[in-house]
């Protein structure tokens, strides 16, 4: 139940990877074997564009994953100012030491007036980066409004949609975004494959030079098998998107309902905002996240902690801190993220173990 960390590879993606491994040719070679590999890479671009609703003519640059794609767009755009929301993934927040952070409200939604003030009357030297959906809370951002604010003053807009791709419908063209990044392993593709999707007319400079691959924007021989697996996962995810989103939303809502029935003081962070249908960040009052993670792991359930332990000290998530959540509550939160293999039986099992962990903690405190 940790799909936001990584998803199991879909059967169709596995088959595509194995088939691609049989292709001996280098995509840059002009002979028959090279042309076959090149054709597979080019055909895969269409599947990636379809997953995010990008029109023909959009650029697709294959990368090693979301992190590289984020850096390529933000640093390759040529803009001097990088303005990001305070709840961005470290792959965005850490891309440059001079990144400017924009505050979010208590539900984790960006403060649009603060963004407007930061851009001022001239954003021609700026690129704004705001994720479509947060990896910890699942909270969805108002990207269309963000784009309108930024474009009005000449700023470019990038969005890391790594967590949203394959989970909700994405309309690259309708949103008006300039750059968008995805990572295959979040929607059933292999690890080590990702892509940057960009409008055809926006500035973009390579960070990795080489032999001219990816139209000179990302040097190095393409990861043909990874790209093939990503394309197959994109097709499968898009085909199942509406039904799967509805199914996961039902499971998640049922999980949260059962938890609140057990412990009314349990807190679902970001519940006041629109969220991904698969994601729930739950605070168990008085029980450290590390204790919960260990308890769930012993019970055969994989989830993530909302806080991390380094050198014996609890460190609050920057996302929760940006939302104004105190350190104590943040230290007691875990993230549950569902996916295609999860069932109602899994939810029931999770709730039972959650209650067992809570009961043990109550008894230990009483003693």
Image (spheres, helix red, strand yellow):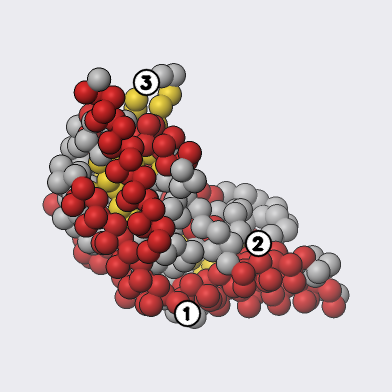
User: In the figure, residue 106 lies in which quadrant?
Assistant: top left
- Residue 339, compared with residue 4, is above or below; it is below
Q: Which type of secondary structure does the marked residue at label 1 adopt? A: helix
Mark 2 or mark 3, which is nearer to you?
A: 3
* Left or right: 7, with 128 as reference point: right
On residue 239, the disc is: 1
Give the mark, 3 or 1, whose residue is nearer the N terminus: 1
> In the image, residue 341 lies at what x, y percent?
49, 64
Q: Which residue is drawn at 36% across and 45% down?
A: 353
Q: Is residue 303 left or right of residue 328?
A: right
Q: In which quarter of the image is the C terminus?
A: top left
Q: How many numbered marks have been drawn onto this rendered protein structure?
A: 3
Residues marked 1 and 2 touching at CB (< 8 Å): no
Residue under the point 15% across and 46% down: 264
Q: Residue 313 carries which label?
A: 3
x%, y% of residue 84?
A: 31, 47
Task: Tell me where residue 206 appears, x and y as whole percent.
Answer: 57, 53
Q: Mark 2 points at which residue?
A: 226
Nearer to us in this view, 90 or 163: 163
Q: Do the residues labelled 2 and 3 touch (CB within 8 Å)?
A: no
Which residue is drawn at the image coordinates 84% and 74% (left, top)? 33
Label 3 to label 1: alpha-carbon separation: 44 Å
Q: Which callout, 1 or 2, points to the residue nearer the camera?
A: 1
- CA distance for labels 2 and 3: 38 Å
Q: How far apart are marks 1 and 2 (CA)?
A: 20 Å
């Amino acid at each position: 139940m940790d799909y936001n960390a990584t998803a199991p590879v879909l059967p169709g993606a596995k088959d595509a990877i194995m088939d691609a491994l049989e292709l001996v040719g280098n995509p840059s070679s002009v002979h028959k074997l090279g042309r076959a590999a090149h054709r597979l890479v080019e055909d895969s671009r269409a599947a990636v564009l379809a997953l995010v609703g990008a029109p023909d003519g959009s650029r697709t640059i294959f990368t090693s994953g979301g992190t590289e794609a984020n850096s390529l767009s933000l640093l390759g755009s040529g803009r001097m100012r990088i303005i990001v929301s305070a709840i961005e993934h470290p792959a965005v927040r850490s891309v440059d030491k001079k990144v400017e952070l924009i505050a979010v409200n208590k539900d984790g939604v960006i403060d649009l007036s603060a963004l407007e003030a930061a851009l001022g009357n001239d954003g021609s030297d700026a690129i704004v980066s705001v994720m479509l959906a947060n990896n910890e809370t699942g909270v969805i951002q108002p990207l269309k409004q963000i784009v309108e604010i930024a474009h009005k003053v000449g700023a470019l807009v990038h969005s890391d949609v790594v967590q949203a791709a394959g989970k909700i419908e994405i309309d690259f063209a309708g949103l008006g975004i300039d750059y968008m990044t995805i990572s295959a392993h979040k929607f059933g593709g292999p690890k080590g494959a990702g892509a940057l999707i960009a409008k055809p007319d926006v500035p973009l400079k390579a960070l990795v030079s080489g032999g001219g691959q990816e139209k000179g924007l990302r040097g190095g021989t393409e990861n043909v098998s990874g790209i093939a697996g990503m394309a197959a996962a994109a097709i499968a995810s898009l085909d199942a998107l509406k039904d799967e989103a509805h199914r996961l939303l039902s499971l998640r809502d049922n999980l949260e309902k059962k938890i609140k029935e057990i412990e009314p003081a349990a807190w679902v962070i970001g519940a006041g905002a629109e969220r991904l249908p698969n994601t729930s960040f739950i605070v168990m009052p008085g029980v450290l996240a590390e204790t919960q993670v260990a308890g769930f792991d012993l019970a055969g359930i994989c989830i993530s902690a909302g806080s991390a332990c380094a050198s014996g000290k609890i460190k609050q998530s920057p996302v929760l801190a940006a939302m104004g959540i105190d350190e104590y509550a943040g230290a007691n939160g875990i993230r549950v993220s569902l996916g295609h293999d999860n069932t109602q039986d899994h939810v029931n099992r999770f709730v039972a173990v959650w209650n067992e962990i809570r009961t043990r903690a109550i008894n230990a405190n009483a003693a």
